Image (tube, coloured by chain):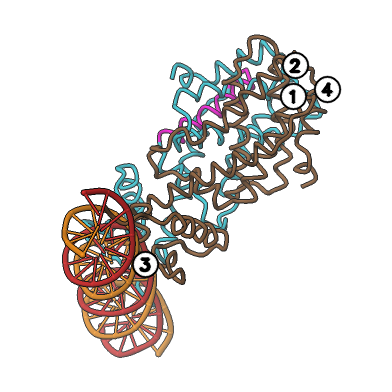
Chain colours: A cyan, B brown, C orange, D red
Amino acid sequence: MARTKDPAVRSLLLDRAAHLLSARQPVTLRTLVAGTGVSTMAVYTYFGGMDGLWQALRQEGFTRLAARLAGVTMSADPVRDLAALGAAYLANALENPDLYRVMFDARFDLEDAGAADETLDRLVRAIDRAKTHGRFHGEVEPLELATQSWTIGHGLASLVATGPLPHQALTHGVPLLTALFTGAGDEPARCRRSVERGWGRLLPA
Amino acid sequence: MARTKDPAVRSLLLDRAAHLLSARQPVTLRTLVAGTGVSTMAVYTYFGGMDGLWQALRQEGFTRLAARLAGVTMSADPVRDLAALGAAYLANALENPDLYRVMFDARFDLEDAGAADETLDRLVRAIDRAKTHGRFHGEVEPLELATQSWTIGHGLASLVATGPLPHQALTHGVPLLTALFTGAGDEPARCRRSVERGWGRLLPA
DNA sequence: ATCAAAACATAGCGCTGCTATGTAATGTGA
DNA sequence: TCACATTACATAGCAGCGCTATGTTTTGAT
């Protein structure tokens, strides 16, 4: 008994926001709708305000990350796969640095808690796989090891994306993950080779 | 042949900014000077604008961090000391979460690059000490290991301060650092004991 | 004592997100 | 099919933001 929303408008606004973000142009209510033909009210009908737009943008960021991780093909070497997931995480963060910053920007009260859960779950499953392959010893808690891997990935991504460390520093991911996985029971030399293979093109800077 | 600046005004503004920040009240040009008796122009006289104030605030954050790290007393166990430095870093980040966020907030172009250098240097020296004690093997590059320790610390601090991980997750610091230092040559069981000692009160959540 | 220079106060500009108001479009019940 | 309630949408205007132009006052060197 009323007018319906047009999903295309919503996508249009999100796309334009992402474009402005990557073009390092300010994302404001007015710059957002400028040239789109829609009025500023559209932001309120579809997102309830700018905060809602940022939240939707974060969701988009996590969705894109999930897709990126899903693109990592599993191999016969589960530890390589773990490193490859880490590399994919970092690659995504550095290819969309602005979106990554939005995703982990403070000043949001985590109503979209669990947005990162899919990411973590994928890690957990990869670790489970390494366990069944006998690379990690039995006491390893997959969720804990996944959280620790995430900590390394996020720390690296954040320090590089935010400035304190140069891109070169991404190579630190190899010794960090190798140390972590070796501590989880993998054989050191073999572990390092696996991680290096998984880290892939992030290695030569 | 002119009027001189009053350092007290500068401190007053910085103090008030920190207060507003910790009180979770918006830090704006007008809220900053409200009730202080000084006018908005003061912010421009002493900081050149709000950006300058944020920059000064970051400097203050790093100064406070340096003081915190300086308060860690070295013991006979250098690996414990390394973990204690990590714990102090995290404790500082979580006691001044807003300031920590300002410190590592993106959208600043690193003109104050090197602000974090003192922190890193302290880590380097602690690692050097562990090397001379024979805890790490000779190929260990202190700067690299320091950067990797920082990555772990910042990753944890960021994920906890920004929301995705609960405070409980700080305990992950122990296995992470243990794995890293064990990989650097320390004997596993001894390393874990040292790290646990250094991690201290961050352990019981 | 003089006077230039800098600190300081005030007012106002263009921008921000947001909302109040009026209008046009549309899915639904009769 | 038609009327209407309901929602999308456009416009205008509000308070607040950072910043700057302007005029005044203070002050330190000559």
Magenta includes A89?
yes
- Badge 1 crowding class, 10 Å Cα cut-off, few under 14, some 14 to 19, many 20 or more, is many
Question: CA separation, marks 4 and 3?
Answer: 60 Å
Q: Amino acid at mark 3?
A: Ser
Marks 2/1 in contact by CB < 8 Å: the verdict is yes
Q: Residue at x 69, y 30 (%)?
A: B176
Q: Amino acid at mark 4?
A: Ala
Question: CA separation, marks 4 and 2?
Answer: 12 Å
Question: CA separation, marks 2 and 1?
Answer: 8 Å
Decide which of tag 4 and tag 1 comes sooner along the chain: 1
Circles 4 and 1 on the same subunit? yes
| Element at label 3 | loop
| Element at label 1 | helix
What is the span of residues highlighted in magenta in the rendered image?
A75-95
Question: The N terminus of chain A appears in which quarter of the rendering?
Answer: bottom left
Can you tell which quarter of the image residue B173 is in? top right
User: Residue at label 3?
Assistant: B39
Marks 3/2 in contact by CB < 8 Å: the verdict is no
> Which label belongs to residue B189?
4
Which label sits in the foreground, 1 or 3? 3
Marks 4/1 in contact by CB < 8 Å: the verdict is no
Which of D11 and A162 lies nearest the eye of the viewer?
A162
Residue D1 position in % (x across, y down): 25, 83
Question: CA separation, marks 1 and 3?
Answer: 51 Å
- Viewed as shown, does residue B75 lie left or right of A92? right
Question: The C terminus of chain A appears in which quarter of the rendering?
Answer: top left
Which label sits in the foreground, 2 or 1? 1
Circles 1 and 3 on the same subunit? yes
Decide which of tag 3 and tag 2 comes sooner along the chain: 3
> Which label belongs to residue B78?
1
Chain letter of the residue beneath label 3 in the structure image: B
